[in-house]
Image: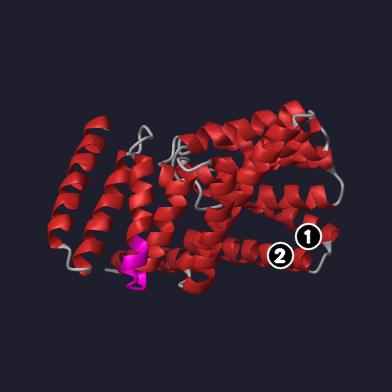
Amino acid sequence: MKSLVLAYRHILSILVIIVVIGCALPSSESNENAHNETLNAILHEASEATNKGRYEEAEGHYLAALEKIGTGEDHVLSRLHVIHNLARIKAVRGKISAAENLYLKALALLEDHPGKDGIFLDGLIKTLGSLGNLALSQSQLEEAAQYFERIIQIKSREPVSLRSHDGTLASTLAGIAKIEQARGNTQYADSLSNRGLGLKMYAQGFELYTHDDFERAESMFRRALSIQEKILGVNHVDLAVTSASLALLLSAQNRYTSASPLLMRAIQIYKTHPNTEYELANCLFRLAGNLRQLSQHAEADRTEQQAKVALAKFNNRDA
């Protein structure tokens, strides 16, 4: 009996030790939370310093943040964010070589990552643009041209109707225009610059439209159309994209009579351009909807049938 009591006391003491040790050691989850809180605090300080023009202080914070971010797959986006901000600070402070090295580091990270054609594609475009602008600021025309050309190649793989929404194509064309101007190709530079200006107006209009600022969005779309009509001719795909977006805006305000001619214009342009079956089908479906709102049901039926044919061609092309 005595031995049994001793054994019980021994087991109890071991359990007490285990409990005490377990309480003394923080969990991995709490460690991670504390780490994230520290990192977020550093990034907040870096952002505050940047906004107030204290770039040396901001640079120190971003360097500290970079040391704290892990190197695994889960931390790639965080590292890219910090690297970009740090590179921008370096460039502002005149440390061009250091900024370039950081952007190249980001580029290598993106190119080596298997997700670069998915959620990392925007980061790739952003990095190429930063490298292009940095090279251009140093009059490194060939290097800048190569970076900008890669962006054009990436954007060319996107659907026509989506290429111009974010302003990337506009800013890239503006960069190429500066290169051509420096090379003495003034006429070509002007045409690129003007097209870029039209796309910039379009991108601003689309941004306003997404925030339901219809009046200002319409003004921007019409300014874009005016520029595009003057410099691109009547059959350029940019005109189709802008016309279709303006028609979408007008339809959202029940202005179907004004929207329908714009859709017809976009449809006629898309019919003459290859690989635009999806955009053609989309415009035809929208036009059919507008015609129904205007009680033109027979014409709406014919237009909807054309839309289905165009959509079938698109599906067969991608099959």
Residue 303 appears at what percent x and percent y? 20, 51
Residue drawn 50% across the image and 38% down it: 155
Residue 70 appears at what percent x and percent y? 59, 48
Identify which amino acid the numbered label 2 is placed on: Ser
Verify whether residue 73 appears in magenta: no
Q: Quadrant of the C terminus?
A: top left
Which mark sits nearer the N-terminus, 1 or 2?
A: 2
Image-quadrant location for residue 135: top right
- Residue 260 drawn above or below residue 280: below
- Residue 135 drawn above or below residue 15: above
- Disc 2 target residue: 47
Magenta range is 252-259
Identify which amino acid the numbered label 1 is placed on: Ala
Q: Which mark is residue 79?
A: none
Q: Is residue 32 left or right of residue 7?
A: right
Number of numbered discs on residues: 2
**Residue at the extreme right of the image, as rendered:** 94
Q: For mark 2, does the 10 Å Cα neighbourhood hold few (<14), some (14 to 19), or many (20 or more) residues?
A: some
Residue 271 visible (yes or no): yes
- Secondary structure under the numbered disc 2 in the rendered image: helix
Residue 276 appears at what percent x and percent y? 35, 38
Verify whether residue 256 appears in magenta: yes
Q: Which mark is residue 58?
A: 1
| 319 or 19: nearer the viewer | 319
Task: Check if mark 1's residue and mark 2's residue have beta carbons within 8 Å.
Answer: yes
